[in-house]
Amino acid sequence: MVRVLFVALALMFGAVPAFARTVSIVVDISDQSMAVSVDGDVQYRWDVSTGKRGYHTPTGNYEPIRMARRYYSKKYDNAPMPYSIFFHGGYAIHGTTHLRALGTPASHGCVRLDPENAAVLYELVREYGPDNTAIQIRS
């Protein structure tokens, strides 16, 4: 009886964790596009730029390992990388000033987005949490 009462009280007061909401980011290198889903429903589709000839964007499944609202590349002449979501070493999804190149391979390996879209994505990952975010980069 006591155990049943305890479980009932725990359920009433939210002591049992709710199901986590998830964010899925799928980058398609061949299409130079990104689809962003929340709980399995695609919410956004954006053009991206990935690694140009001589550079590659790593394929595979990742989670965010670090995030920075403002970041400047230490490797490439202090180039701005706003709304960076790092997923593999120094590789990140981030905003770019090279908007005309979106939809074509143009980066040194990072996944570039329009800064407005990068801000939306950054806030979405921040809100739902890096642990609830999956990043898939496919060729």
Image: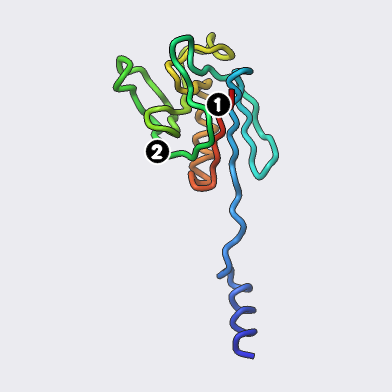
Coloration mode: rainbow
Task: Choose between 29 and 83: the one closer to the eye.
Answer: 29
Q: Residue 81: percent from the left, percent from the top?
A: 40, 23
- Pick the front one: 138 or 4: 138
Marked residue nearer the N-terminal end (2 or 1)? 2
Mark 2 vs mark 1: give the one in front: 2
Q: Where is residue 56 in the image (x, y as percent from the top left)?
A: 47, 18
Amino acid type at image mark 1: Asn
Q: Residue at position x 60%, y 31% from top?
A: 26
Disc 2 to disc 1, C-alpha distance = 18 Å
Q: In what element is the residue under mark 2?
A: strand
Residue 117 numbered tag: 1
Viewer-proximal residue, 63 or 1?
63
| Up-down relation of residue 134 to residue 13 (above or below) | above
Q: Which residue is drawn at 44% across and 10% down?
A: 54
Q: Which mark is residue 66?
A: 2
Could you tell me the amino acid type at mark 2?
Arg
- The residue at the far bottom in this view is 1
In this view, 23 is above or below 32: below
Residue for point 42% across, 26% down: 82
Do the residues under discs 2 and 1 have CB atoms within 8 angstroms? no
**Going 48% across and 44% down the picture, which residue do you hit?**
130
Residue 131 in picture, x, y percent from top left: 49, 47
Question: How far across and down, in percent of the image, does residue 36 sit?
Answer: 62, 33
Check the image and report above or below for 8 versus 17: below
Name which quarter of the figure residue 139 lies in. Answer: top right
Q: Residue 53 carries which label?
A: none
Instruction: Rate crowding at label 2 as few (under 14), some (14 to 19) or many (20 or more) other CA atoms within 10 Å.
Output: some
Q: Is mark 1 on a helix, strand or loop?
A: helix
